[in-house]
Amino acid sequence: MRFEFAAAGRILFGPGTLEEIPSLVDDLGKKALLVHGRGRERARRLEEVLHPKGFEVVTFSVWGEPTTDLVEEGVRLARDEKCRVVLGIGGGSVLDTGKAIAALGPNDGPLLDYLEVIGKGKPLLVPSLPFVAIPTTAGTGSEVTRNAVLASREHGVKVSLRNASMLPRLAVVDPLLTHSLPPTVTASTGMDALTQLIEPFLSNASNPLTDSLCREAIPRVARALPRAFRNGSDSRAREDLALGSLFSGLALANARLGAVHGLAGTLGGMFPAPHGAVCARLLPLVFEANAQALRSRNPLSPVLDRLAETARLLTGKASATPEDAVNRLQSLCSDLCIPSLSAFGVTSGDIPVVAARARKASSMKGNPVPLTDEELGEILLRAL
Ligand code: NAD
């Protein structure tokens, strides 16, 4: 057995931990770029606690899922203002934008040079500026991963900027920040976390450490998600989702993902659809396709036991089968009102292009069994 486990330099979890940030970042530099989402309100409390400690804060706003253009704009600002540290407070879109700005800031040349798949994939030679990640959604786990997912409108795909030095210096996970999430975002982001726990658990690069994180968090997320959807102030459910999201980031960064993310990343580059909702819609279908493909092509695969174990973790039933997992995931999707892909403009005519592009996605390599173009096409057709 051989594995590596990397995470943010330090992780602080718990209600109210936002207030502790100034003392934790004191030695990182007093000139900070603060990246935040559409509303300033979630960043305002952070500014309030930073100012009395002598921090000079420059703000940068992120409106949707990050694009390469947006990151280049943020890099120019960070360089012009000579920022020494980047703080991101928001959902995965904000965290990935901040993480990419921090990484690219000290490195020369266009962003495209450093991107996977559509760029040259050059290594970032100069280490990233220190990045502090403060999630306000419970879904992506980006606070502990070494990549930023960026959409290139020009190429119509989402790709990662990835480097070991992009692991955040500090992750502060304060579940109180997620209480204001509306039900639709609670649902889509929570299903993203669940996908990021199930795919690494089934992936061909799982290890005992990521397995234990997934085993702990899958039941928590499956139980908490409908509760937080119905009542956003259920603090126990919010805490379980924030923990599940954190563990999902630790799992995906140290094991791989799979076909759900291969397809979702491709769709996200082509259609303006929330990443988590796309993952949710695809998850039961990919789970079922993986079970069928393994039974017919590799019936002795130990992953078949994993599929049954996932079913037990999702349902709490000792006798659960992979079909029970599919049913549980389908009923979660309908309870959480997850839309079908056609709601985001995907049509049957798009399927061949999506399937062909998804094959090249880095996440696809982690799927426990290679799926054919026909199988990917069938998944997409059923998700419409
Ligand atoms: P998001 O960041 O796009 O946020 C979704 C919506 O929720 C936005 O409108 C935002 O303003 C709002 N919001 C955020 N926090 C809120 C709060 N506390 N209260 C009310 N509204 C709030 O969504 P997300 O799912 O967190 O992030 C999606 C992005 O993350 C995608 O681009 C995806 O590709 C990326 N991602 C990255 C990683 C990684 O490891 N780097 C992993 C998974 C996903």
Image (cartoon, helix red, strand yellow):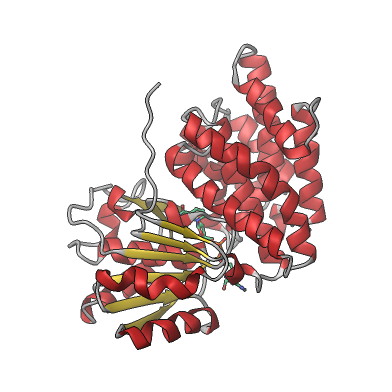
Relative vertical location of residue 101 with respect to residue 379 in this rendering, above or below: below
> Residue at coordinates 49% horizontally, 27% vertically from top-left?
204
Answer left or right for 55 relative to 368.
left
Residue 172 on image: x %, y % = 46, 63
- Determine if residue 189 is in view: no
State which quadrant residue 201 falls in. top right
Answer left or right for 57 relative to 260.
left
- Determine if residue 92 is in view: yes
> Residue at coordinates 54% horizontally, 71% vertically from top-left?
16
Q: Quadrant of the N terminus?
A: top left
Answer left or right for 227 relative to 174.
right
Residue 349 on image: x %, y % = 64, 48
Q: Nearer the viewer, residue 27 or 153?
A: 27
Residue at the top extreme, as displayed: 300
Residue 113 on image: x %, y % = 25, 54
Relative vertical location of residue 62 with respect to residue 251 in this rendering, above or below: below
> Residue at coordinates 79% horizontally, 41% vertically from top-left?
328
Q: How many marks?
A: 0
Indicate the quadrant of ligand 1 in the picture: bottom right
Residue 231 on image: x %, y % = 78, 67
Relative vertical location of residue 193 with respect to residue 14 in this rendering, above or below: above
